[in-house]
Amino acid sequence: MDRHRSGRRSARPNRFVHGPRKDNEAVLAGLTLPNGNGPTEGVVNEIKLLKRQTYGWASFALLRKRILLDQ
């Protein structure tokens, strides 16, 4: 069994190491530009909070109205 395993290599670590090289421009932009996704994450967090508050007693239509009115 060990002999069989030694001949096989997993593709997952290889993709993890070499994947960012394919997207070098995107990785560089993500590390150097001041822009981020913080505002988007904040909106998503508020929507999830409203969804948790209305769980079990509000319909989707009411949840949608609440989200639109909240922003």
Image (cartoon, rainbow, N blue to C red):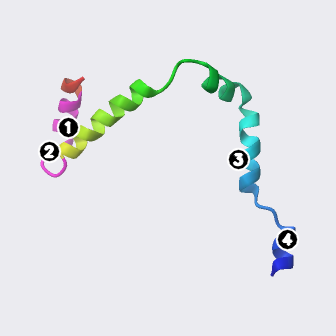
Q: CA distance from mark 4 to mark 3?
A: 20 Å
Q: Amino acid at mark 3?
A: Phe
Disc 4, SS: helix
Which of marks 3 and 4 precedes in the sequence? 4
Q: Rounded to the nearest whole Å, what is the CA distance between mark 2 and mark 3?
A: 43 Å
* Residues drawn in magenta: 55-67
Circles 1 and 2, Cβ within 8 Å, touching? The answer is yes
Contact check, label 2 and label 3, Cβ < 8 Å: no
* Secondary structure at numbered mark 3: helix
Q: CA distance from mark 1 to mark 2?
A: 7 Å
Disc sitting over residue 63 in the figure: 1
Of the 4 image quadrants, the one containing the N terminus is bottom right
Which amino acid is tagged 1?
Leu
Q: CA distance from mark 2 to mark 4?
A: 57 Å
Q: Does the magenta segment cover residue 66?
A: yes
**Residue on which the image places disc 4:** 6
Q: CA distance from mark 1 to mark 3?
A: 39 Å
**In the image, is residue 42 above or below residue 11?**
above
Q: CA distance from mark 4 to mark 1?
A: 55 Å
The kind of residue on which mark 4 rests is Ser
Secondary structure beneath dot 2 equals loop
> What residue lies at 18% left-to-right and 31% top-to-bottom?
66
In the rendering, at what x and y percent does residue 41 appear? 40, 32
Q: Which mark is residue 16?
A: 3
